[in-house]
Image (cartoon, coloured by chain):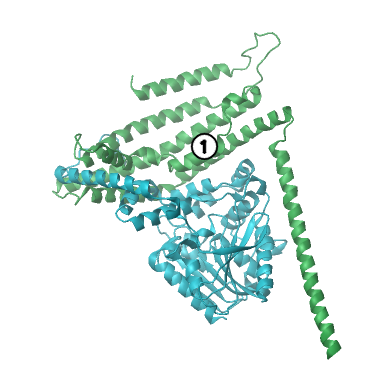
Amino acid sequence: MADQESAKGPAAPLTLSPAELLAEVGTLGRRLSEGAKLFADVSDADVEIATTPKDLVWSQDKVSLYRYRPLAESKGLPPVLIVYGLIGRYTMADLQEDRSLVRNLLNLGLDLYVVDWGNPGRADRYVTIDDYVDGYLAECVAFIQEAAGREKVSLLGICEGGVFTTCYAALYPETVNAMVLTITPIDFHADTQSARAGHGFINVWTRSLTPEDIDRLIEAQGSLPGAFMGSVFSMMTPMRTMTKYNLDLLDALDDRKKFLNFLRMEKWIADRPDHPGEAAKQWLKDLYQDNKLVQSAFELGGRRVDLKAITCPVLNVFAQDDHIIPPATSQALKDRIGTADYSEMGLPGGHVGVFVGGKAQKLLGSGIAEWLGQRG
Amino acid sequence: MDQFDAFRAMGEFWTRAGAGFFTQGAGQSVPGFGWPTFPNADLAGMAAAQSKLTEAWTAATTLSQTLTRSLQGGPDAPDPTAGAVLARIFDPQAWLGGSAEFDAALTRMSEGPQLADLWQTERRYAALFTAWAALRRAQSEHQAVMLDAWTRAAGTFAQEANARAENGESFASARAMMGRWIETANAVLLEVQRSETFLTSQRAVLRASTDLRLAQQDIAAFLSEFYGQPTRAELDDVHKSLTELRREVRALRRERRQAGKAAKAAGSQVAEDAHG
């Protein structure tokens, strides 16, 4: 209250050391000028992402399945299918050569596939999570089974894609060899278990809406626009959002490598497809609001997604500082599935940092490969 | 008259003019022509919200300028570019709408066609105008919440900086001072974003932008029908049918694949039995 009172009128001038501050301001100006030169030198090729070689092996509607070309001798393990969600794109797993989960796994001899959901448009308003899991994902698995001559494949789900793989593994347990979940929400209300500032804002924000708000939003837009979700993510790190194109960028200007990393990350962030409308309703209402997944009450294709039906080994990877998917929302899977072969891996860093952070991404790749290797 | 007085006066004028324009019966003097009965747009509410915002804005701007000047070491700072960067960091404008980006996203989502395209459909235009006014009001109210938060953060920061100065302590560098401001501001913002006030006003903006979008679509549908063009609803029907057909095709393919597998397995069994 006292703060508010004092803020009504102009604040008293701050007593600071002018000479040093002026020198700093001068340095700032020089760095901005150097940064402008650096920008001018950057070409599209310098900031290309998802460059690991792969081949299109199957497609249906807007969905494409790719198989990565091997980078090392095969370990002879069942193929692994990477499944990203509809918020953001799979390219995060292969951001750049030295920060690529995909390359790390290929270098360890895994046979790797990735599904790309494409760019859903207004015409995809009526596509549901049932279609993605019971339809497209099931088709991708069927293709890989056939191509590899195996009854089972391993799944690697990321974020919303982890929810998709969880649902798939519950509906089709006989086809899943092992499942790795990364930064995946299971209990969408477990954010309340922690009072860490800024963590779980999407959970709070979504619960502040009524189901009718969501229905009308989708009726008006036909989708959950990617740009809209981007703005919600920006709200989660408010000052970071305000300073990233000045202070953070300035910090990156000293080092061309760091600067290009910054630009590649921005490129990934900007590539945010729209989320099909009906699938978005399920995501926001059934899962974020009604929390049906953890209660085994979520339904797809007329069948209940019973977590106890998941019988394959599960590795659950979470980020210790994940403000988007707080760890407790992921760890809720423990004791709720039908297998005792459940492991957790908590990695340092935030939601995206697990995949692109210098240390975490190396631990992630080797940790997953080792865990899969032990399960044959 | 300063810019804010002008802004307020414009709002009042707009309210009076708008209320007169939308009074039932206006235009009845023209034989054979009458305005339809328009819904009452809440222009007074919009003006009140904007007036409140203006007051908050004046206080915030003064404080922002003081902070920026202090950080630059006075009015004679040597580098205008660097000065602009510092001003941006302390600019309360960046806080409006939770983040300007969120507001801009909603605005882009809701503002499709130009208003000039819509003059042929008075009744729908009135509904659209009502929705527009409601959105502007909701945005102003939300911005006032954010400005209040900014003022609180800036006040906290100024107090701390002044206390340091009084104790003879200064920040090690301008960057250290900015770092402290960012830390202070972030803590306030994160707290505000979880408050019921923030969530309520932001939800109101979301609802109002959705209503505006739907009002626009109503006009678009009216015009499309009038000119024999497919409407959004008709296209949605087509897309729904297409999605359902794709589902059926997928199911049939799966059945065929499974039948093929079953037949193959049965064939292998027969062959094994025959050779057994």
Q: Quadrant of the N terminus of chain B?
A: top left
The amino acid sitting under disc 1 is Thr
> Could you tell whether A131 is left or right of B61 in the image?
right
Q: Position of residue A195 (x, y in %)?
A: 42, 59
Q: Position of residue A183 (x, y in %)?
A: 50, 64
Q: Position of residue A34 (x, y in %)?
A: 29, 47
Q: Quadrant of the C terminus of chain B?
A: bottom right
Q: Residue at x 68, y 65 (%)?
A: A138
Which chain does the residue under circle 1 lie in?
B
Q: Residue at x 64, y 43 (%)?
A: A219
Judging depth in this view, the residue of B252 and A225 nearest the camera is: B252
Q: Residue furthest right?
A: B274
Q: Residue at x 20, y 44 (%)?
A: B162
Q: Is residue A273 above or below residue A344?
A: above
- Label 1 neighbourhood size at 10 Å, few (<14), some (14-19), many (20+)? some
Q: Is residue A149 above or below residue B275?
A: above
The answer to whether residue B194 of the structure is visible from this angle is: no
Q: Position of residue A122 (x, y in %)?
A: 64, 45
Q: Classify mark 1: helix, strand or loop.
A: helix
Instruction: Residue under label 1, please give it.
Output: B107
Chain in cyan, by letter, is A
The answer to whether residue B211 of the structure is visible from this angle is: yes
Q: Residue furthest bottom?
A: B276
Name the tint of chain B in the rendering. Answer: green
- Tally of numbered tags: 1
Q: Residue at x 50, y 32 (%)?
A: B136
